[in-house]
Amino acid sequence: MFFGFLVVACSPQSPKNEIEATAQLSGFLDSFQASASRGKRPALDSLSEKSFQSALQKVKKGLLELESIDTAMLGGDDLVDWKFAHSILSGQALELGSMRFYRRDPRIYMGFTDLSRILAGPGSDSSKIQEVLPRLEIMPLQLSNGMAQLQTNVPRFTELAIFMAENAFLLFDRELPAFQKKAGIPADVLTEPAAKARRSLEMFLDFLKKDLPAKPVGSFAIGKTTYDSMLARQYLLKGGSDVLYAFGLREFEITIEELKVMAKKIDSTKSWQEGVRIVKRQSPAPARMIEAHQIWVDKSREHLIRNDLIPVPWMERVRVVPRAEYLRKTSYYGNFSLAKEKSKDGIFWSEWMINPYEEQWDAKRKKEYMEEHDWGVIMVTAPHETYGGHHIQGLYQMHNPRKIRRENGISIFSEGWGLYNEQLMLETGFFRSKPVQIRQLHLRLWRNARVIYDVGMHTGKMSYEDAIKLMTDKVGFLPWAAQLEVDAAAASPGYFIGYFTGMKEILKIREEFKQRMGEKYSLRDFHERLLKIGNMPPALMREALFNNLNQEVSQN
């Protein structure tokens, strides 16, 4: 959720002029490091209390140095970068100083589960050994620190951590031995560290089942004061949580009215809920689930290119793959992995990881899975994740010439951009049938609801049970899917408001840009300009976009 902190190498001094201010900012931004936040700590971090406190002190020093730069001496992209850096550091200061999830969420200490991805991913056996070995060696220390530092029992966090830990034994009992067999003698170096790591996992699981439940019961909510600070300082949104909550409720009712209108167009005798249920009963064959997703990923790419919606100047592709087993309870659907670098054949590959259908499930679970993986949700979600959603946005960000924008982002734009692409595909004729269109509206209602329960749960306006009820009774989610959905928001305050709020902000920016450009306006131009700017809070995206336009006008 938060992306990066600064290593401060010198004491700040106030700049005397624009040149000095720009130079000071440039030096500051050069020291901006990769993410060190919750869930994204460096793999070899000890995850000790001292480590988290040290990170907090670095963040505070970074803020002091940044705030010493006279912003009156900055302009254009430099001022935007200053504001972006400030929003990032402010968010991380709140996370490390106020939220302190490392004291209540056991999953923070289980980053070793990423080893499954490393073993199954690209690269030579020797490079994998070099990457896996130190992670195995530090794992006992990380889990030991977790057992010492987890002070309260948040029951749902504990339950999910137990599930994650139990499934993680597959890494030691199946995946690592298989890799060692394939890699041969050089991989023998992993045997002893793996045995120690496995024993530490057994101890951690025992702690989760016996000791942690005996600790004082805690809450995942971060509180209204912290939430308001997050909105203002990190997301750069005006009005606070009360305004955002009211916005979510109002837009929720607007979307329901649109659903009612669409339902009447399809069948005037049925409610919108009945219309959605009919659509959700139409699914691919279970054995073809991954293939079905790939088909609509490819179709969304064809639509993007045929209609010249966004320039795509790179060799790239997206493949759909089954999601790793240990991750399948962290969300009900799946996750998207952005391209990191070119493959050997010069292609940027991203992966859409889908929770697969599993034959060992009972009949009820199988039926429920199929109802949440219908053709409609596949067709609508494919553009969100791939073309021209996260995959395309990620490629633009990867190639941003400004380091801070290349290496950092925020959900209120990136997830807002994904949902915006669902709307874009509706506007440009990708969703041709009314049943798919009502599913698209239903999925928008879901993101609408996220604003309500993210704000509600973390500020005390709603309970965990209220959020589940909203998702099941008003949105129509099945109980297990609703629970996984709400679990994610409980662990990542603020992230889920990004989808709907970000989409609405992008649409407002687009309309303003359209009015400004007049006859010169095109979707292609708007999208290219916006994506080249970066992945920042919408207020900064807007500022940078119109700064660039004003500069063009002044030069002509």
Image (cartoon, rainbow, N blue to C red):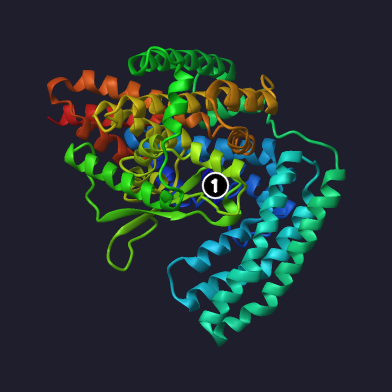
Q: Quadrant of residue 547?
A: top left
Mark 1 burial class by Cα count in 10 Å: few <14, some 14-19, many 20+: many
Q: Nearer the viewer, residue 46 or 272?
A: 272
Q: Which residue does the image show at 29% across and 41% down from the upper left?
A: 532
Q: Quadrant of the C terminus?
A: top left
Q: Quadrant of residue 521?
A: top left
Residue corresponding to mark 1: 5
Residue 540 in the figure: left or right of residue 467:
left
Of all residues, the one furthest to the bottom in this rendering is 185
As helix, strand or loop, the secondary structure at mark 1 comes to loop
Of all residues, the one furthest to the right in this rendering is 214
* Rendering coords of residue 370 (x, y %): 49, 41
Q: Which residue does the image show at 24% across and 29% down from the upper left?
A: 429
Q: Nearer the viewer, residue 115 or 32?
A: 115
* Rendering coords of residue 234 (x, y %): 52, 32
Residue 471 in the figure: left or right of residue 535:
right
Q: Which residue does the image show at 54% across and 70% down from the upper left?
A: 131
Q: Which residue does the image show at 39% across and 40% down from the upper left?
A: 378
* Rendering coords of residue 469 (x, y %): 64, 24
Q: From this viewpoint, is residue 244 visible?
A: yes
